[in-house]
Image (tube, rainbow, N blue to C red):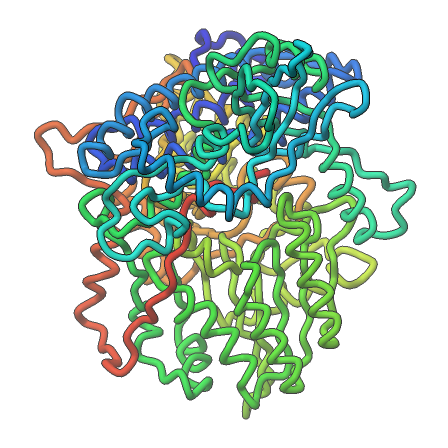
Amino acid sequence: MADEEPTGSFDDESWYLNRELSELSFQWRVLYEALDGRQPPLYRLRFLSILTRNLDEFFMKRIGGLKQQIDAGVTTSTVDGRSPKEQWRESLEMASDLVETQARCYQHAVQPELEDAGIEIIGAAGLTDEESDRLRSYFESSVLPTLTPLTFDPAHPFPFISNLSLSLAVLTRDDEGEERFSRIKVPANLPRLIPLFDVGTPVDEIEGDPRGRYIPIEEVIAANLDLLFPNVEVTHYTTFRVTRNAEVRRNEDVAEGLIEQIEDVLRQRRFATIVRLEIADGAADRIRELLVRHLNITEDEVFEVSSPLALRDFDGLVDLDAPSLKLRPWTPQQHPRFAKLDPDRPDDLFEAIREKPALVHHPYHTFDDTVQAFLDAAAHDSDTLAIKAAIYRTAPDSRVLRSLIDAAKNGKQVAVMVELKARFDEENNLRWVKRLEEEGIHVAYGSIDLKTHSKVALAVRQESDDVRIYSHVATGNYHSGTAKGYVDLGLFTADPDVGQDIVRLFNSFTGHSRQQEYRKLLVAPETLRSRICELIDREIEHAEAGDGGRIIAKMNALEDPGIVEKLYEAGDAGVDIDLFVRDICRLRPGVDGATESIKVHSIVGRFLEHSRIFKFGNAGDPAYFVGSADWMTRNLDRRIEAVAPVEDPDLQAELDEILSVMLSDNRRRWVMQSDGSYVQQHPGEEPVRDTQEILMERARARDPGESRNPEREPRREPNVDLDEVYTDESEL
């Protein structure tokens, strides 16, 4: 993505990069992790899988939304001057290049590297006679009974194609020369890759040496089509896959409440408009033409793919017991402060937070021994009166919510805010709402007009001198799985002002009015936007007074035009600005005569950078904040977000250390150019400085001045499929 240099005042459209193309630019950086020959092959395969998942969600949400606007006749331009149709067309072109490069990477780099290492992925044409016979027996016993061929002819309608399902399109001809089309859905509940040396064993259950030959299940089905279509000639077959719009309209007039509305959305999404057809390269024209016509799409929405479709399903190989083919595994470490605590004495944890606030950094610090320990302690502590938590996403089998259920059974007052509108997690959250309500827990569902995205929890305790509130304000979800793959921060504090602010926030969840003022928290949509602008204005004043201005901000996305324009004003005034923006960024840095003092960085590595850190220099008396909000219009105006100040000098120093490591990264850091393109930094003759590797090593080493409880080693947390968590679904 590269645009021309901007001109005119800061409100001119040339100053703003396009949101969709900026997101796809991030996907190029994700793909580069697979293209980078310095990486081991299973790591590279993992990122090919991740890219497939990311593009699936981009098409479901962003392309789906654009197509909806086009169909509705919307022609209004975005702040960068593009109409919905222009964005749709440019996005399809850029996505097509991504898919083509991904396929070449698989075919010409990753697959050959794996083969050299003894892991060979083959097609049906590569089978020996003995392998074919063995697979035919497996097919007849285990696969054939699960398949249902659906034929399209005058007696049968065109079959329904479910979202993201892998299918075979088959053309057959009978004795009278009549040709028919059939669709076979590849069963998602059977392993995608079948080990030929251990047929029938799922890849993730292979014991011992995993080297050998593997075959995709669709190739096994294709090799045995005669058993599905006896007494006719199979003239052609190919694989295909469709993507449906997830941005369906919510029928607010019909739905009686939020739960009914979400259930209606889930039903609509299943049958929503198709926004993309992926089809194997070389498919017969007859199949392609038939699919395009009956799926009601244009040729622009057809993606021919030369590698296997749905590479996201190859992620089972990533967990093979093949250490030489992937990065060294990472086990989250104990936090030095929490390592000293006795898990059987809840008082220890609360006393530690009361004495001094703590900052936990996932996945470098273990989730179980910090956040989960906090909730467990509150649930079983005799002095705890109440627990409240805001849940945006959580694991399907969530210890977090089980702790809240235990708390209710132990007589605590428990209130939980569960956001039902968390996209693609609606069903999981609905199940938990019903379970929590069955346990007598007060559950709020959010509101129709605002999505609750804040990550906050509190425990209220009766102590000898008073009732005290212990708070947790985080950048990430209460999700033990994503805590192993997302980089997130959490602040534990007994600050009464922060605690009272969170109490007010929860009252707005369950009551009928919203708090307008807060003591310390920056809360969207009430105070966050105005306070961020005030803090930027203060840096402008310092710069204009000759005292220097300094801003360092880390976030997932910078999209809001108002904040971008305010940063332009700051850069123009000479404020020194470093922005770590993982993906979407509308701002153009480094423009001569205007934004030379602004730099935009993006770090892409084994973990998904998800934390938000904001530092404002304030002429030597800096202000620091962490929280859930990106600088996007929806976060500032249409979501409930919570950002907390970090006031303890030691914790401020920890944040400075993190930011300093990131600024010095010469391995994973990309720097945006003024035209919107990115350049990855390289160490050259310098030592390699990889942010995530450095922070892992520091977590291993801990602070030598801190004592440690030898009885309490960090829990060996179960492996997590990082392909499942790398995509930041909270952005969707």
Does 414 appear above or below 213?
below
Residue 21 pos. (x, y %): 51, 20
Q: In screen coordinates, is 4 left or right of 109?
A: right
Q: Is residue 408 visible?
A: yes
Does 613 appear above or below 30?
below
Does 102 appear above or below 368?
above
> Which residue lies at the image location 68% right of the left edge and 15% below the top edge?
297
> Which residue lies at the image location 19% right of the left edge and 40% below the top edge?
689
Q: Quadrant of residue 565?
A: top right
Q: Quadrant of residue 397?
A: bottom right
Q: Nearer the viewer, residue 216 or 715?
A: 216
Q: In screen coordinates, is 678 left or right of 79?
A: left
Placement of the N terminus among the 4 image quadrants: top left
Farthest residue to the left: give it: 685
Residue 329 pos. (x, y %): 26, 53
Q: Nearer the viewer, residue 259 or 359?
A: 259
Q: How many dots with numbers?
A: 0
Q: Is residue 569 visible?
A: no
Q: Nearer the viewer, residue 517 or 102?
A: 102
Residue 427 pos. (x, y %): 68, 52
> Which residue lies at the image location 59% right of the left edge and 28% below the top edge?
230
Placement of the C terminus among the 4 image quadrants: top right
> Which residue lies at the image location 77% right of the left edge and 17% below the top edge?
71
Does 713 appear above or below 313?
below
Q: In screen coordinates, is 185 left or right of 325?
A: right
Residue 701 pos. (x, y %): 19, 62
